[in-house]
Image: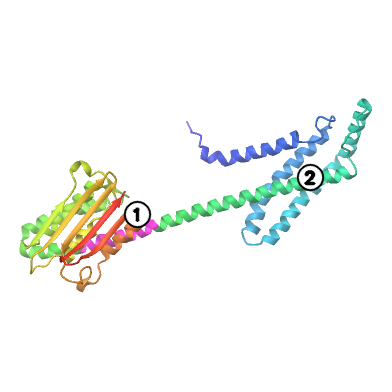
């Protein structure tokens, strides 16, 4: 059974209700009702006038406003609006003459006067007719004004919705581009490490390939989604740390701390933490002297993730060096701005006097 879609039918319902209200004004607010018995020709005229209102309303909304007002021809639009109103009033008066409605109303008033000795305050001729014409002109101008206002509001809403859609598409495209940069960058470095490991220890190289395949499954099946459980993201980071440890000597101390297992279901953006960790291994490890990499992930609150990465600092070239500035940190900053605007605090820099470089991220999700 088909369900009633209120959103799809809300606009037609509004139109029906508004025109029903206008129709009632022609009946309930007419000054002739209750004073005389109006002839059938009177209702014919009212029905035709109502139809002219509807035609003028939609002509303005569908033709005049889009083709003139929205294209910057305000002067022409005002002229066409006045001509439309004048045409409706003139057609109304021609119809009244064709139906001989004035004479019929005069007869009705005369009969009322003869029967009850009633002196009517309304007469069908002379000055009163001019006032009726003015009322008709003001009424049709009101209808056209409402048509214009409705069209302008709908255009504004449509443009605003379109602008939001374009902004969302832009953000989505930019995120996809940034993610596409991060992933090849990571795998390029990792494959280089495995290649170097094959020369030293084939068994460890096999273990590294197995770990890398698990990481690739994560990238293929988790990163296309908008978010992933923190547990899976940390498993991915753990695999990366394990992969890096296979090629490190005993001179490098590596520490990875993560929250308890029951606190890792918070949803975060995938591949968000890895660039900070990757940067620490890339620039904080020296084969010729003792060095360290410290990684800690905590959950200070139910919707807060804290990342603390520290590594050895061997000079001002950290974050760049001979290979130039790394794109991982720059892209991750941009992803944070797009995904968590105003909901994160990131501090990156050398700790003076300690020989340590630190990245501290506090993220509210």
Please name the residue shown 15% across and 69% down the image. 314
| Total marks in image | 2
Horizontal side, residue 198 vs residue 274: left or right: left
Q: Position of residue 239 (x, y in %)?
A: 16, 53
Tag on residue 161? Answer: none
Name the N-terminal-most of marks 1 and 2.
2
Please name the residue shown 29% across and 46% down the image. 303
Which of the 4 image quadrants contains residue 212?
bottom left
- Give the residue at mark 1: 339
Which of the 4 image quadrants contains residue 17?
top right
Q: Position of residue 224 (x, y in %)?
A: 30, 52
Residue that extends furthest to the top in the rendered view of this protein = 115
- Give the residue at mark 2: 135
How far apart are labels 1 and 2 at the CA level? 58 Å
Q: Is residue 19 above or below residue 173?
A: above
Q: Position of residue 268 (x, y in %)?
A: 28, 49
Horizontal side, residue 305 vs residue 53: left or right: left
Please name the residue shown 52% across and 40% down the image. 7
Residue 22 painted magenta: no
- Looking at the rendering, the stretch of residues picked out in magenta corresponds to 171-188
Main secondary structure type of the part rendered in magenta: helix
Residue density around tag 1, few if under 14, some if 14–19, many if 20 or more, within 10 Å: some
Mark 2 secondary-structure assignment: helix
Residue 229 shows in this picture: yes
Residue 212 shows in this picture: no
């Amino acid at each position: 059974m088909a369900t009633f879609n209120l959103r799809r039918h809300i606009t037609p319902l509004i139109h029906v209700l508004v025109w029903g209200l206008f129709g009632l004004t022609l009946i309930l607010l007419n000054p002739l009702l209750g004073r005389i018995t109006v002839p059938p020709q009177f209702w014919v005229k009212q029905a035709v006038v109502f139809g002219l209102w509807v035609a003028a309303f939609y002509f303005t909304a569908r033709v005049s406003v889009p083709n003139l007002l929205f294209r910057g021809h305000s002067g022409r639009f005002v002229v066409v609006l006045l001509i439309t109103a004048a045409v409706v009033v003139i057609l109304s008066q021609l119809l009244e003459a064709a139906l001989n409605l004035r004479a019929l109303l005069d007869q009705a008033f005369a009969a009322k006067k003869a029967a009850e000795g009633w002196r009517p305050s309304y007469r069908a001729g002379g000055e009163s007719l001019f006032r009726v014409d003015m009322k008709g002109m003001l009424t049709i101008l009101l209808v056209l004004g409402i048509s214009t206002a409705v069209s302008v509001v709908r255009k504004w809403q449509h443009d605003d919705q379109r602008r939001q859609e374009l902004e969302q598409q832009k953000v989505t495209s930019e995120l996809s581009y940034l993610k596409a940069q991060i992933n090849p960058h990571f795998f390029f470095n990792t494959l280089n490490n495995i290649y170097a490991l094959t020369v030293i220890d084939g068994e460890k190289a096999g273990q590294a390939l197995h770990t890398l395949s698990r990481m690739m499954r994560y990238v293929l099946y988790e990163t296309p989604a908008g978010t992933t459980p923190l547990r899976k993201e940390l498993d991915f980071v753990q695999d990366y740390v394990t992969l890096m440890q296979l090629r490190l000597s005993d001179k490098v101390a590596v520490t990875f701390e993560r929250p308890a297992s029951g606190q890792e279901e918070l949803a975060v953006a995938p591949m968000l933490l890895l660039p900070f960790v990757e940067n620490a291994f890339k620039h904080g490890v020296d084969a010729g002297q003792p060095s360290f990499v410290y990684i800690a992930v905590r959950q200070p609150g139910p919707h807060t993730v804290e990342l603390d990465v520290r590594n050895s600092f061997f000079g001002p070239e950290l974050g760049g060096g001979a290979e130039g500035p790394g794109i991982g940190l720059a892209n991750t900053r941009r992803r944070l701005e797009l995904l968590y605007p105003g909901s994160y605090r990131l501090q990156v820099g050398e700790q003076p006097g300690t020989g340590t470089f630190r990245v501290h991220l506090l993220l509210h999700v």
